[in-house]
Image (cartoon, rainbow, N blue to C red):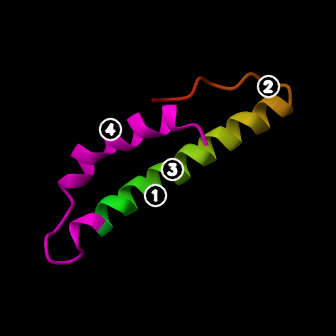
């Protein structure tokens, strides 16, 4: 997985996700890791869909940041 695309994606999610964090429900470090994990999974899914479109001969849309 290319960290070049993943790190900015995960960092961009933090301000939005932080508004949904409730202290006491989950330790902050665990919550932060979950946000990063979800970003990695979505990044991987986008790359997979892009590769499938390319394999089918269709032009994929550019990857969103």
Rendered view: 28 above or below 64: below
**Is residue 16 in the magenta section?**
yes
Check disc 4 and report its element: helix, strand or loop.
helix
Left or right of 29? Residue 8 is right
Q: Are marks 4 and 3 in contact (CB under 8 Å)?
A: no
Q: In the rendered structure, which disc, 3 or 2, sits on the residue that comes first in sequence?
A: 3
Q: Of the numbered discs in the image, which one, if any, rests on residue 37?
A: 1
- Left or right: where 1 falls relative to 54: left
Of the numbered discs 2 and 4, the one sitting upstream in the chain is 4
Image spot of residue 48 (x, y percent): 70, 43
Residue nearest the observer in this picture, 46 or 11: 11
Q: Nearer the viewer, mark 2 or mark 4?
A: 4
Residue 59, placed above or below residue 14: above
Q: CA distance from mark 4 to mark 3?
A: 13 Å
Closer to the chain start, of discs 4 and 3, is: 4
Crowding at dot 1, Cα within 10 Å, few <14 / some 14-19 / many 20+, comes out as few
Mark 4 nearby-residue class (10 Å; few <14, some 14–19, many ≥20): few
The image shows residue 64 at horizontal and vertical percentages of 50, 29
Residue 6, given in percent of the width and then of the height, sits at 48, 39
Q: Which residue is mark 3?
A: 40
The picture places residue 26, in percent across and down from the top left corner, at 24, 75
In this view, which residue lies farthest toward the right? Answer: 56
Residue under pointer 2:
58
- Could you tell whether 54 is left or right of 61 in the image? right
Q: CA distance from mark 4 to mark 1?
A: 14 Å
Residue in the image at 27% along x and 47% along y = 14
57 is higher (above) or lower (below) than 6: above
Magenta residues span 1-29
């Amino acid at each position: 997985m290319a960290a070049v695309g993943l790190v900015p994606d995960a960092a961009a999610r933090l301000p939005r996700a932080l508004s949904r964090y409730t202290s006491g429900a989950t330790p902050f470090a665990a919550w932060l890791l979950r946000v990063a994990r979800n970003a990695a999974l979505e990044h991987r899914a986008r790359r997979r869909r892009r590769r499938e479109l390319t394999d089918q001969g269709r032009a994929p849309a550019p990857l969103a940041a």
